[in-house]
């Protein structure tokens, strides 16, 4: 049989997907986290993997799903949060723009699965299925009430789920996870199917979404989920020492307020009194793609006049960040390789070709 005869669409998908294979899974497993540091990997969107010196592996908001894949469907589902928000009906052209850097079915060591909220790009049935069917039955699923309800609906045992609200604390090995207020106002206009919520005051944010603070031996990491900007960030900044803060950044289409802008990112960092602010989420949706340079330019313009005590860090999906080792970095670059160049004699006709 020829090579062409062997190839099918299914063989192509298995051979090429996920794009990174198990590379990142292996990197996380092999990483030895040094004392008084914390290692983090950006999994795409706002997915975050945290690994600590005490061996805690905490996975937050890992999403292995897809955006729009066909133009055949013309309208949004009734009750979709964006339709509720702006009164639109046409399908949102949010194609997934980021590669899959981790294989959920190749995860071996994880101590907790977290979800900041129940929107489909922050909680994943594939991850849940693998963890429930193949890993330690004591691994908890931690999130607000609506995330827990979704996990249970998918088949995660109720006794594996930990429902949290702002103020709750969960201990995972050498790390304390503090649930904090979310400011994801898109969640407040999210309904289960179409409901007329005009004139109805929402009171269930704590059931829908939370932010998380990870208090690790290497520093405190603030995960803001899909929070919009809120002046209450300043309260969190006064109540907790925050080293690194992650914020959902994006270029909001006309008529939509769903992501923090460049100005919002700087205001959040200042209010939280953090040392490093990292924009995330901007990578995932084709219709929300922003320019990261906006944050850098505004930070350069304001940092001296306003006395900023923080700086931005511009990550790449799949990249590792170690705090405080990488504290002074502003830009990330993947390992460029070729560290062993000229350890062996080159196989070239003559040196002048080099």
Image: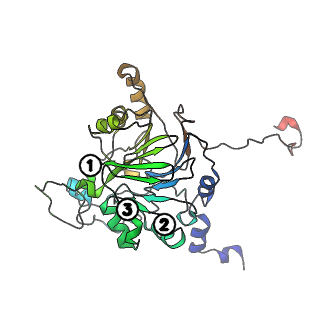
Query: In front: mark 1 or mark 3?
Result: 3
For disc 1, the marked residue is 256
Measured in 3D between alpha carbons, the distance from the residue under mark 1 to the one under mark 3, in whole angstroms, is 33 Å
For disc 3, the marked residue is 162
The label shown at residue 297 is none
Q: Is residue 98 above or below residue 151?
A: above
Position of residue 187 in the picture relative to residue 112 (left or right): left
Q: Residue at x 35, y 72 (%)?
A: 153
Mark 2 Cα-neighbour bin, 10 Å: few <14, some 14–19, many ≥20: few
Position of residue 55 in the picture relative to residue 59 (left or right): right
Q: Which structural element holds mark 2?
A: loop
Q: Give the mark nearest the N terminus, 3 or 2.
A: 2
Q: Which structural element holds mark 1?
A: loop
Out of 33 and 302, give the one closest to the viewer. Answer: 33
Horizontal and vertical percent for residue 201?
14, 54
**Residue at the limit of the structure toward the left, as seen here:** 199
Out of 204 and 8, give the one closest to the viewer. Answer: 204
The label shown at residue 138 is 2
């Amino acid at each position: 049989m020829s090579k062409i005869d062997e190839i099918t669409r299914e063989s192509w998908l298995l051979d090429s997907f996920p794009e990174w294979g198990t590379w990142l899974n292996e990197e996380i497993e092999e990483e030895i986290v040094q004392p008084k540091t914390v290692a983090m990997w950006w999994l795409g969107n706002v997915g975050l993997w945290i690994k600590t010196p005490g061996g805690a592996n905490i996975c937050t908001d890992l999403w292995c799903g897809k955006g729009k894949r066909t133009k055949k469907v013309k309208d949004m589902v009734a009750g979709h949060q964006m339709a509720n928000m702006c009164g639109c009906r046409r399908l949102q052209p949010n194609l997934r723009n980021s590669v899959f850097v981790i294989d959920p079915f190749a995860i071996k060591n994880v101590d907790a699965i977290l979800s900041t909220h129940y929107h489909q790009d922050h909680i994943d049935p594939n991850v849940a299925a693998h963890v429930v069917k193949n890993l330690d039955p004591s691994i908890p699923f931690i999130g607000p009430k609506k995330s827990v309800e979704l996990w249970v609906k998918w088949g995660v045992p109720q006794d594996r789920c930990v429902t949290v609200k702002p103020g709750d604390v969960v201990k995972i090995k050498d790390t304390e996870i503090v649930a904090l207020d979310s400011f994801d106002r898109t969640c407040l206009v999210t309904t289960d199917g179409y409901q007329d919520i005009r004139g109805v005051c929402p009171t269930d944010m704590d059931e829908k979404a939370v932010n998380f603070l990870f208090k690790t031996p290497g520093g405190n990491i603030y995960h803001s989920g899909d929070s919009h900007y809120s002046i209450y960030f300043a309260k969190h900044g006064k109540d907790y020492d925050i080293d690194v803060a992650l914020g959902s950044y994006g270029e909001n289409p006309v008529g939509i307020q769903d992501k923090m802008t460049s100005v919002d990112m700087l205001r959040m960092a200042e209010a939280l009194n953090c040392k490093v602010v990292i924009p995330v989420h901007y990578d995932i949706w084709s219709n929300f793609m922003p320019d990261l340079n906006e944050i850098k330019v505004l930070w350069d313009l304001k940092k001296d006049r306003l006395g900023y005590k923080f700086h931005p860090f511009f990550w790449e999906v799949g990249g590792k960040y170690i705090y405080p080792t990488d504290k002074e970095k502003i830009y990330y670059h993947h390992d460029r390789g070729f560290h062993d160049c000229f350890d062996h004699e080159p196989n070239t006709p003559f040196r002048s070709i080099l």
